[in-house]
Amino acid sequence: MSARALRVEADGGSRGNPGPAGYGAVVKDADTGQVLAEVAEAIGRATNNVAEYRGLVAGLEAAAGIDPGARVEVRMDSKLVVEQMSGRWQVKHADMKVLAQRAREVLPARQVSYRWVPRAQNSHADRLANEAMDAAAAGRPWQRASGTAAPAAASGPAGGPAGGPAGEERGPRTTLVLVRHASTALTEQRRLSGRYGADPELSERGLREAAAAAASPEVAGADVVVTSTLRRSRQTARAVAAAVGADVVVDPQWDETDFGEWDGLTAAEVVERWPAEHAAWDASPDTPCPGGESLAVVERRVAAARADLLRRWAGRRVVLVGHGDPLRVLLRSALGAGPQLQRRIHLDPASRTLLRYGPDGVAEVLAVNRV
């Protein structure tokens, strides 16, 4: 049987070059044109080319999450990115070298081809990128524009919102199964591992944990598996999706906190090197890690991602594979607890936490940290 064919359309841009920047990417079935995934993100201040590369990486990661064995054609209106990724032009800029290498690591080179298209033929990704740039200029996370359709899942019942049975008193309720990613070497050493860090893969222990999570009763019957873009989360998500027969949707809004200069360090090392900064960060959700994100920023993008998820899969059972900070934010929100409890909630690797949302968005907590 020949490999599945997917098409990635990606774009990125900056208002000012550098200036408020964002990217957008869409994954389509190459044969039918069906939209399988949309990703976009406001990335703060960056150049056009960096934003374009970020869109490429996000699109490839979304395609890999749908089918890591697929043949992927990438279409972009950036001649620079297409020529550099095709190997005909050199990548000279330091930031783009890192992003180009990350793009090459997502899927084997033999599975990916690149094609330049005029801007008019890249309108879907261009629209998403412009929404993300608008969000960056406003200092907020990207959210899908109201009135635009959410992408359909590749197959099965997860293709969009669905109502509950006729006459159901409260309307459809959505079950959200939170699965923390399984262990990596950094997890086992209790080191911080953020969204722009080393991006480690699962350890041998982590592979066993992911298999156990995939066989757990909590994930059974899931309609879709949603994951962050980070490797450890995508690996765990693929194990779960294979076991339950669901599609994987990749969304960068569920990525772990950007820990900046603290990435790769233990808590003790952070306190020793940045005592004042750590105390300020611990005391206020508005204080970011040096060179990274604050908890308040993470809370805002999680709130946007949660609202999008509940609209798209209303009444379904959704497995969300993610990271400690975003999952704790969801649990705190369900409990009505403030940021002072963020560091007092423990979620084990590959643990399952169950939330159920009514049509009004009010959540019930059904179980916490099952292992």
Image (spheres, rainbow, N blue to C red):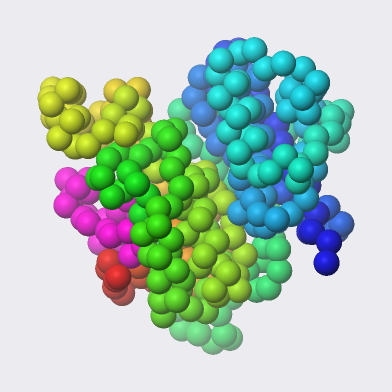
* Viewer-closest of 185 and 213: 185
Does residue 344 show up?
A: yes
Instruction: State the image coordinates of residue 213 (x, y, percent, origin top left).
Output: 41, 69
Q: Residue at x 50, y 47 (%)?
A: 231
Viewport quadrant of the N terminus: bottom right
Residue 330 falls within the magenta-colored stretch: yes
Instruction: State the image coordinates of residue 252 (x, y, percent, origin top left).
Output: 52, 44
Compared across the picture, whether 159 is left or right of 320 comes to: right
Q: Residue at x 70, y 31 (%)?
A: 11
Q: Residue at x 79, y 59 (%)?
A: 3
**Number of numbered labels in the structure image:** 0
Give above or below for 124 relative to 307.
above
**Numbered range of the magenta stretch:** 322-351
Q: Residue at x 16, y 52 (%)?
A: 344
Instruction: State the image coordinates of residue 119 (x, y, percent, origin top left).
Output: 82, 28
Instruction: State the image coordinates of residue 27 (x, y, percent, origin top left).
Output: 72, 49
Compared across the picture, whether 96 is left or right of 360 comes to: right
* Viewer-closest of 224 and 42: 224
Viewport quadrant of the C terminus: bottom left
Q: Main secondary structure of the magenta part?
A: helix
* Viewer-closest of 306 and 65: 65
Residue 336 falls within the magenta-colored stretch: yes
Give above or below for 280 relative to 38.
above
Does residue 150 show up?
A: no
Compared across the picture, whether 49 is left or right of 222 comes to: right
